[in-house]
Image (spheres, coloured by chain):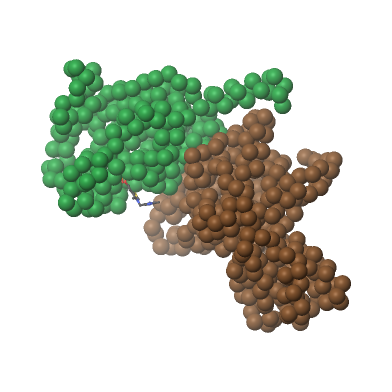
Chain colours: A brown, B green
Amino acid sequence: MTTPRLMQGNEACAEGALAAGLNFYAGYPITPSTEVTEILSRKLFENGGRFIQMEDEIASMAAVIGASLTGAKAMTATSGPGFSLKQENIGYAAMAEVPCVIVNVQRVGPSTGLATAPAQGDVMQARWGTHGDHPIIVLTPSSVSECYQLTIRAFNLAEKYRVPVIMLLDEVVGHMRERVELPSANQVEIINRKQPDAAPHQYVPFRSGYDKVPSMASFGEGYRYHVTGLVHDDDGFATTNPEIVQSHLNRLQDKILLHTPEIVDSEQVDTEDAEVVLIAYGGTARSVTRAMRMAREEGLKVGMFRPISIWPFPEEQLKLLSQRNVKFITVEMNFGQLALEVERVVGGKNAVYRANQVNGELIKPDTILDRIREVY
Amino acid sequence: MLPEVEQYFRIEKLPHMWCPGCGNGIVLHSLINAISGLGLDQDKTTIVSGIGCASRAAGYLDFDTLHTTHGRALAFATGIKFSKPELNTFVLMGDGDCTAIGGNHLIHAARRNINLTALVFNNNIYGMTGGQYSPMTPNAKRATTAFYGNIDRSFDLMELAKGAGATYVARATTYHTELLTKLIMEAHKNKGFSLVEVVTACPTAYGRYNKLGKPADMLKAQKENAVNIKSLKDGIVPEGKFLIGELYRAEAPEYIDQYLQAATKLREKGGK
Ligand SMILES: Cc1ncc(C[n+]2csc(CCOP(=O)(O)OP(=O)(O)O)c2C)c(N)n1
């Protein structure tokens, strides 16, 4: 461990990315994510990496994908309006299976919304923002040290499964400062994309084995292969053959489904004896933790279930919990986006209540406590 | 196919998907002649393209090839080149791809003077989607979205690129293939952002709609209307004609050079 220091969530994302081996960053400034861009502009310049401020978020996403194809570990960070612009090329990364990390520090939307205020309105956009069914992984930290750890994990997952991975923060988490003790460089596990083991003339760029993840050659190494956002065959060339189209799109889905048990992550606090379980993620989980303690002081048996990966959703973990006689309350800074997923998983076996707030302020522990008392 | 160009093609992907009379194949031939003439290492050369008929060219060429999203080719190419500057990077785009949806990326790539060689296949129309007007469709010409004639003014792509900061700007046609090859070679030799516009015929989506005759007539029109800048008298382009040749060349610092030099200097100073 390194010496403890005070750090901001956005800064921890930048530091985590560097620890994971980030060497290319393209971005466009937008509140409340700008610190990530600012910090990396300086650090990458200093350490031999590459930083570029592009003309917009569409271009930033494109440059990240281009760099990743040459073998770089590449990232971009943004917020609401910029996240919308990135969607086109996030889809490209999903289709062409190009590893990359996108940090989205959520603010109030739609449109320009509230630039400096927290929200969690991009939960569904993070999952379904680009057109078409596509694989994606979304992680949601709720502390500064988790920003660091999950950014490293985001890179590892992106590299391992060749998918875009989204770090879904909110303004509270991005801007909060906490004391952190970061692991030193040799304590960080780093996963790199699988390299082809075939000679260039035998390389089939999109053929995969049992794990459904193809190996990935870097541009400029003699493999001379084709990459397209069109549906393609294993050779990488566009096809409209229905059988190949179906099997290609199946594989993109299966690639994540197959590895869901390794990808999902969640935390449970005081759920063993809980009669009411609060479901929360990101900044909201902080208020929920406090509300839970207040409720316990009143003798109310309350626990928390915190999805850390929200896509894929920790379905099995929640299902297990739902087999007990508990009531759920999903607490979100939106009109109830992850609540839909909770309801689906619980499948009517338990009552699912909601506590939602979209006023630009972090939902207060008192508000949550009131809701707990109502449903208890 | 001639053996000296064959090695650069993915022969098994031919025949190509373009219509009879389309000029895109001619452009490809010149591009390959230029790459071969420059003696570029095939393993260290990458072709990036956008979306459209022209952009399909990437798939036929035996390099690392990246067929991107509509208009974004230059932004993808910027990531490739900046990350691995030793790669020779060619960017192929249609006129709509480059100047409409990709217009912002074009001017910023030019402004940075990043070392990319861009080739714009200008067929004056959106070919792939069936003939809608582009920012390069001349005023009054017809398109499926300009049934009564195009009201828009068109870009002068050469002036646009120059104004935005490109350091090599040239134009040829599919009639002037030797000139085209030479210009692509010169463009690639320029260390900075280079743009070559190729006037190419789309008999299907543009010619037919504007009664421009057979493909051969469209080629003939290129011959008749193009004026080589070297033979230009008094600097005045005659009405209805357009310039070809090397139209602009300038010296300016290249983006990646600047970045790497500044970063190296900082490290040498022990700044970090
Ligand atoms: C974001 C987006 N918008 C629209 C399209 C549809 N589209 C495909 S190609 C094209 C225009 C192609 O025209 P041009 O760039 O001039 O190239 P050409 O086909 O003439 O070679 C359009 C509008 C698309 N693929 N993506």
- The answer to whether residue B99 is left or right of residue A283 is left
- The answer to whether residue A151 is left or right of residue A218 is right
Quick one: quadrant of the C terminus of chain B?
top right
Quick one: quadrant of the N terminus of chain B?
top left
Q: How many marks?
A: 0
Asked whether residue A71 appears in the rendered view, the answer is yes
Asked whether residue A156 appears in the rendered view, the answer is no
Residue located 44% across and 59% down the image: A244
Q: Position of residue A238 (x, y in %)?
A: 41, 51
Q: Position of residue B202 (x, y in %)?
A: 23, 43
Nearest the eye: A260 or A122: A122
- The answer to whether residue B123 is left or right of residue B35 is left
Residue located 18% across and 53% down the image: B147
Relative to B94, residue A45 above or below: above
Relative to A288, residue A156 above or below: above
- The answer to whether residue A253 is left or right of residue A326 is left
Q: Position of residue A38 (x, y in %)?
A: 63, 38
Quarter occupied by residue B268: top right
Q: Position of residue A189 (x, y in %)?
A: 75, 46
Relative to A172, residue B272 above or below: above
Residue located 75% across and 61% down the image: A286
Residue located 21% across and 29% down the image: B242
